[in-house]
Amino acid sequence: PVIAPPSTVDGFVREFLQNLNLERGVTLSASNPNDRYIALAYTVRDYLVARWLEDQRRQRETQAKGVCYLSAEYLLGRQLDNNLLASGLTDIATDALAACGIDIGELRELEVEPGLGNGGLGRLAACFIDSLATMSVPNVGYGIRYEYGIFRQTFVGGQQVEQPDAWLSLGSPWEFPHPEAAQTISFGGHTETYDDGGVTRNRWVPGWDVEAVPYNYMVPGYQNGRVNTLRLWSAKATNSFDLRVFNSGDYEEAVRAQTFAENISKVLYPEDSTPQGKELRLQQQYFFVAASIRDFLDHQLLPDFDLTKLPERVIFQLNDTHPVIAVPEFMRVLTDEKGMDWDAAWAITQQCFAYTCHTLLPEALEVWSVDLLGRLLPRHLEIIYRINEEFLVAVRERFGDDEMRIRNMSIISEFPERSVRMAYLATVAGAKVNGVAELHSQLLRDKVLPDFDEFYPGKFTNVTNGITPRRFVRLANPQLSGLITEALGGGWLTDMERLRELEAYAEDPDFRAAFAEVKAANKRRLNDVLLARDGFEVSDGHMLDVMVKRLHEYKRQMLKLLHIVTAYEGIVSGAVAASDVQPRTFIFGAKAAPGYAMAKRIIHLINAVGSVVNDDPRVEGRLKVLFPPNYNVTLAERLIPAADLSEQISLAGKEASGTGNMKFALNGALTIGTDDGANVEIRQLVGDDNFFLFGMSEPEVEGLWARGYKPSEFYQADDHLRRAIDLIASGAFSDGDKSVFEPIVSNLLYDDRFMVLADYSAYIDAQAKVDAAYADQDAWTRSAILNVARCGFFSSDRSMRDYIERIWHTPPSL
Ligand SMILES: CCc1ccc([C@H](C)CC(=O)N[C@@H]2O[C@H](CO)[C@@H](O)[C@H](O)[C@H]2O)cc1
């Protein structure tokens, strides 16, 4: 068995210096910061590898049922601190490096976070695998090792400019490449039938293929000695170099196959709502699911495993529709390759897959044209056709010849072009379909997939999202964690319901004072971070009003901006004395998909308003707008613990869940929000007195829409709204040039799909309540403590327990 190095300062020093010398080939004195960071990472790895190998041996031996989590995105964040925390080595490492004259803090800042995701869906996957490891549930996370992650956002003239994210350029010490375990993944070609001893069988004759090389990452459980695996696939050309063509002098042609192949895992698609339907995206999806299924069947199962027992051995969780091509791939392998008959294979498939939907926006539901699918994956299209055929026979048996319903439920849609509706395929194949918050799951059943809910009683369920408290409380907010442990003792980090015990402390003035001091300290820390990172200063005595999430019109960053412009207009018009305004700093963090023009324009306007408000002496520093670029996991870990107010203001019925809302509440920020997504469950748990609710509910939104929504009527009727919009339209934030933000103004007045104007006055009223509440700091702190105390439910450990109970049936294997 592999022996871990001694968990002592000396042991750590010895291991570190050894890695510096042997792995980096340098002495301590000659080493540069990157050498020292890489050596530190290798050293932490060395302590975890023993547990990892033991776990793999145990899982292979016990063959316990496990979860294969298929996700096109994992927004992991930095690894060093989490691996130190999980292995309980933080203090030892800090002291060991100090003994070598090294400040671990400096090395920590060198780590480039793997941005292998866009936003909520990707981060949720990362929280989930952390919880599965901490709960000792057998799990492999499968995904793509993009060479370039989510773009780096810079601002030029206040406008978003994307830079490639070369996160691997300085090496990636946390990965274990395994080229020897590469899988060959095929594409294109055609299908044919052949006679196999009197049985007509189908087979795929591919046109070309690539190698899928696995890179393993450790997913350590929190101080439980367990380490699960995240396996990310990287594309490599089968024959990367054609010497014959090269010798013929056509050098470019000689390497064309290589570049073509490696494009597959080159870059993450930066969209998080509107699929572009690009062929490369479908190649990415098939590439990683085909490699993952083969890897599971070839390497996780014992050689003579009885495939009919697969449902007792594995559940493949589909993280949205992006991996759903796994269903026809699984059917192809079981029938074409393993010789299983269709019905037996389909019965197994329907037990081995489950689907989580993460959106409510119709435009975010993926559809692939049969043309593209038929060209890239001809055998899979055949299999999808047969799945749909048999499905519609069953629908017809159940509902009779209701052609409308048949057309509505068919996996194949005829308009605008013949396409495969991936959400329908996932729903037909999945044992279970879940939404990610109670309201979302209800809307899925009532509005998005009602026919399927009726046809498949019991298939639809809910699992409300969660976040890992290890990263977003313990690591992001060590002072708050210290305070909680002082009050409750240890153990709460893996049993978050215990936070309830903090309710009593909300009544204790000393605890309130300590809690308020923690928030103040986190604000000072944020100030240091933003000063060094972006040259921003966080003013003392300001309420920190924070809105961080992807830029999307349904999330309504425009509503937040109208609040800021209203407050500013009030001061500069003289209607409000600056001295009467509660000092606030508004902090934004948001990336826009590069192809999403309106989102990029809103980013431009936020920066434009910020530069005018921040420099206007009439404001007397009472209002400040900060928009640090390149919002990511690392910045979130610094921002969220410092926040007073969490902005969760999407139009009701649009945000599936949200997870930032949970992180803010668990870090003692109060929420101003609509009854949307998981906000509803946060409000139910923390209580109406500790949540600033405003705006229309989902049924009210539907009602207004049905009656015909005329945004300009709200503009006419509300003086403050009109003055704010007129100020933007006047060019006040664009050096008098009205044209720059005209598209935003006209969109608000004549379209406003997400009803910003309709919810404006309720929002402004709620913000006035926020100002009034914030004036009583002690009461505010009491409310903040109650938010922490009552939000243990939003631990991703609880989400995992719900998935295990309602969908997976994969108990922890201790
Ligand atoms: C194909 C383009 C594309 C890419 C990503 C997506 C994701 C599903 C978008 C996403 O991240 N959704 C968010 O998922 C979170 C985790 O469940 C939820 O908390 C958010 O409400 C939801 O917007 C949709 C469409």
Image (cartoon, grey):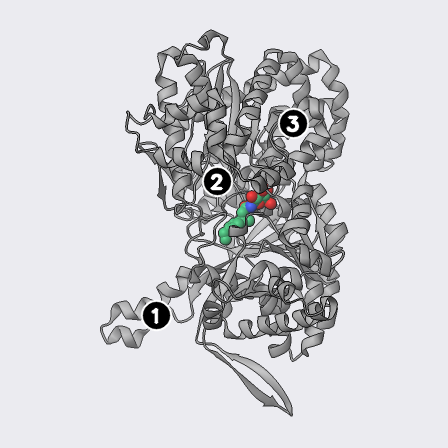
Kindly identify which numbered label has been placed on residue 481. 3
Nearest the camera: 404 or 93? Answer: 404
Query: Residue 195 appears at what percent x and percent y?
Result: 59, 90
**Label 2 CB sits under 8 Å from any ligand 1 atom:** yes
- Mark 2 burial class by Cα count in 10 Å: few <14, some 14-19, many 20+: many
Query: Residue 761 appears at what percent x and percent y?
Result: 54, 24
Is disc 2 placed on a helix, strand or loop?
loop
Q: Which residue lies most toward the bottom here?
A: 198
Mark 1 or 3, nearer chain start: 1
Q: Note whether 144 is above or below 163 in the view shown.
A: below
Nearest the camera: 594 or 41? Answer: 594
What whole-number distance in Å separates the C-alpha atoms at marks 3 and 2?
A: 33 Å
Please say whether residue 305 is visible from this viewpoint.
no
Mark 1 or 2, nearer chain start: 1
Query: Residue 231 appears at what percent x and percent y?
Result: 56, 56
Kindly identify which numbered label has been placed on residue 241. 1
Look at label 3 and name its amino acid: Ser
Rendered-image quadrant of the N terminus: bottom right
Please say whether residue 201 is visible from this viewpoint.
yes
**Which residue position holds label 2?**
552
Instruction: Determine the image quadrant of residue 655.
Output: top right
Nearest the camera: 659 or 709? Answer: 709
In the shown orientation, is residue 812 left or right of residue 516? right
